[in-house]
Image (cartoon, grey):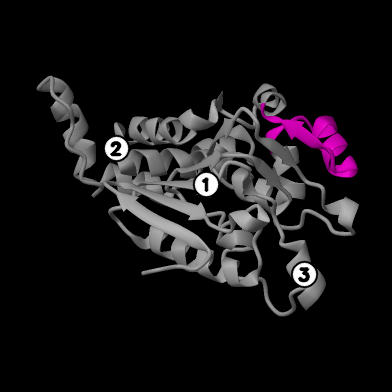
Amino acid sequence: MAYEFANYDKKGHVATITMNRPHVMNSVHPPATVELSAIWDDAIADDNVWVVILTGAGDKAFSAGNDLKYTAEKGMPSGPRPKGGFGGITDRTEVWKPLIAAVNGFALGGGFEMALACDIIVAAEHARFGLPEPRVGLAAAAGGVHRLPRQIPLKIAMGYMLTGKHMTAQEALRFGIVNEVVLLKDLMPTAERWASEILECAPLSVRATKQCAMMGLGLPLDLALSRSYEALQQMMHSEDVREGPKAFAEKRKPNWKGR
């Protein structure tokens, strides 16, 4: 299916979603969110997709966030929040497939919020991150005000959120938001390397790991340990849970089925 505001490709077990509005720094307006939401629906539902990479077209921006010129012309969106939230992803808190953001430039406002909704962030060395919404009379209400303080120290997060200032890729790496900073030419190969390393693991084990980590994160340790996790139960009753030890004993690479 052809999309107007994004590109969507699948190769093997990896799906790549590319925001494609480079003339406006890949900013997202409501029609783009509708497309992106549909793409995310497909990537999440497709059993053959085990890892998703999110990036932006061009070399200037991952996404500058909300398309403010569109908002100035059309007004603030009304009605219910779009499915999945901003860009179709920020409200999806129960996606257990691993998500990788390949940040190829500015990731501001909703763009940063989309990256924060991913599990791994790889950034080009010229990338910039920030939640500048208060500078234009808005707030980072697509998860930024909640995710950033959970991912870096509170005072540092508040400093960035209350001033709207940017952080460099190296600062983001130092704060622990970014996993790796590379040259722009190496960005997608690096994201694909991360995806390949994830694919060496059993997909149901990866999803169980993510679900346990994310759902247990806000709980006291004893409750996190005693809680039942659906993805963990699915893993324990899968073909792959037998294939792993068998492949190890036979000194060969496992043949993961994802079931």
- Can you identify the residue that label 1 sits on? 55
Question: Relative to 256, is 151 on the left or the right?
Answer: right
> Which residue is at 70% across, 36% downward?
128
- Which of the marked residues, 2 or 1, is nearer the chain's N terminus? 1
In the displayed structure, 9 sits above or below 209; it is below
Going by the numbered disc 2, the residue's amino acid type is Ala
Q: Disc 3 designates what residue? A: 71
Q: Is residue 110 magenta?
A: no
Q: Along the polypeptide, which appears first: circle 3 or circle 2?
A: 3
> Is 234 left or right of 54, judged from the image as shown?
left
Q: From where the camera sits, is residue 75 visible? A: no
CA–CA distance in space, label 3 to label 1 = 23 Å
Residue 171 seen from this side: yes
Which residue occupies 56% across, 28% down? Answer: 179
Residue 58: x and y in percent read 55, 46
Q: Position of residue 203 (x, y in %)?
A: 32, 42
Residue range corresponding to the magenta coloring: 151-169
Residue type highlighted by circle 3: Thr
* Camera-nearest label, 2 or 1: 1
Residue 202 numbered mark, or none:
2
Instruction: Say if mark 3 contacts mark 2, CB within 8 Å.
Output: no
In this picture, residue 208 sits left or right of residue 4 = left
